[in-house]
Amino acid sequence: MNIYVGNLSFDVTEEELRREFMAFGEVISVTIMNDKYIGSGQPRGYGFVETASKSEGEAAIASLKGKRLRGRVIDVVEALPLSKKSGIGSPHGRRDNRFNRNGRPKKILNHAKSIK
């Protein structure tokens, strides 16, 4: 089970987070997100923990939700699955450029004929 952990102190390490979750079962991976793409490498204040089973993950969520870790109350919830790229940005899914807002086809001009 993949678990989102938010509101982390910038001082929390992946090993600390792993220890918190190991009390509830096997931890497969721990990742604290950071700004590696802009070069600072500073933590973003959230991360993901993957547990071996759903029951272990649910027990960890129930017990760790609202816990203080390094002076901050952490948010612990089941992580949402990654969405397909076509659905990003629009609650209606992918929009096709060939249709206007009400779903009717747009009139497409043939510019090759008009350039003579």
Image: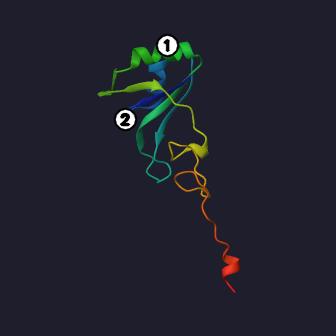
Q: Residue at x 43, y 35 (%)?
A: 46
* Viewer-closest of 114 and 33: 114
14 shown above or below 55: below
73 over 87 or under it: above or below: above
Quadrant housing the N terminus: top right
What SS does tag 2 mark? loop
Q: Of the residues shown, which amino acid type is indicated by label 2? A: Asp
**Quadrant in the picture for residue 104:** bottom right
Residue at 40% across / 18% down in the picture? Answer: 64
Q: Nearer the viewer, mark 2 or mark 1?
A: 1
Q: Is residue 70 left or right of residue 101?
A: left
Residue under numbered circle 1: 24
Residue 25 versus residue 40 in the image, above or below:
above
Pick whichever of labels 2 and 1 is earlier in the sequence: 2
Q: Position of 50 compared to 41: left or right?
A: right
Front-lying residue, 55 or 82: 82
Q: Callout 1, which amino acid?
A: Phe
Image location of residue 18, percent across then percent down: 49, 24
- Observer-nearest of 49 and 10: 49
Question: Is residue 23 something that shows in the picture?
Answer: no
* Local secondary structure at mark 1: loop
Q: Residue at x 44, y 20 (%)?
A: 20
Above or below: residue 82 compared with residue 96? above
Q: Which residue is mark 2?
A: 11
For the C terminus, the quadrant is bottom right
Q: CA distance from mark 2 to mark 1?
A: 23 Å
Residue 59, horizontal then vertical, whole percent: 47, 13
Q: Position of residue 85 (x, y in %)?
A: 60, 45
